[in-house]
Amino acid sequence: MRNIIIVDDSELFRESLVDILQSRFSDLQITELESDAEVFCTLELIQPDLIFMDVNFSSVNGLEITKHIKNLHPDQQIIILTSFNIPEYKTAAFNCGADHFLSKETAPEDIVSLVRDILYA
C-alpha cells in the first residue's frame, strides 16, 4: 500500500484528484487535508510516499510548508499544484524544494503518468 497526502483547500479539486488516482491505482491510500494546520501532525502519522501541495492557503503559503517539510524530510516527494501556472511560481516552487510543479489544469493522464513514474518506476 502506498500513501499519498493531498493538501488543498478546495474540496472539489481534492475529490477530483482522488477519483483520478483511485481509478488508476488500486493500491493507494489517500489522505485529504484541507488546511495547512493538519499537515505536520499527519506527516508523523502517515509518512507518505507522495504529497500533492496546493500553493495558496488562508494562513500560510504552501511553498513555505514545502520548504519546511523538505528541511525535515529531504527525500519526501512533493508535487506543487496551483491554479497560477506562471514561471515565477514554478521557480519559487523548485527553490522551496518541490520535486514537481503542476497546474491544476493538467490533463488527468499527465497526472497519472507522473504518479506512475514517481511511485512505480
Image (cartoon, rainbow, N blue to C red):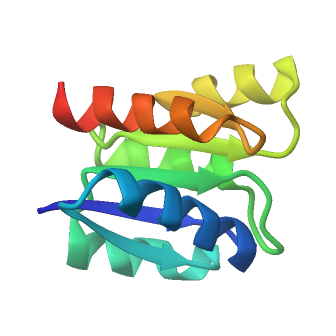
Quadrant for the C terminus, please: top left
The residue depicted at 28 percent of the width and 47 percent of the height is 73
Above-or-below relation of 118 to 39:
above
The residue depicted at 69 percent of the width and 35 percent of the height is 106
Above-or-below relation of 35 to 28:
below
Image-quadrant location for residue 108: top right
Q: Give x and y (percent) for residue 11.
A: 70, 79
**From the viewer's perspective, is 30 left or right of 65?**
left
Image-quadrant location for residue 103: top right
Q: Give x and y (percent) for residue 107.
A: 66, 35
Above-or-below relation of 18 to 33:
above
Image-quadrant location for residue 87: top right
Q: Residue furthest left?
A: 1
The residue depicted at 83 percent of the width and 74 percent of the height is 58
Q: Residue furthest front?
A: 23
Quadrant for the N terminus, please: bottom left
- Looking at the image, which is closer to me, 98 or 59? 98
- Looking at the image, which is closer to me, 59 or 22? 22
Q: Give x and y (percent) for residue 77.
A: 35, 39
**From the viewer's perspective, is 71 left or right of 9?**
left
The residue depicted at 37 percent of the width and 80 percent of the height is 41
Q: Give x and y (percent) for residue 16.
A: 62, 65
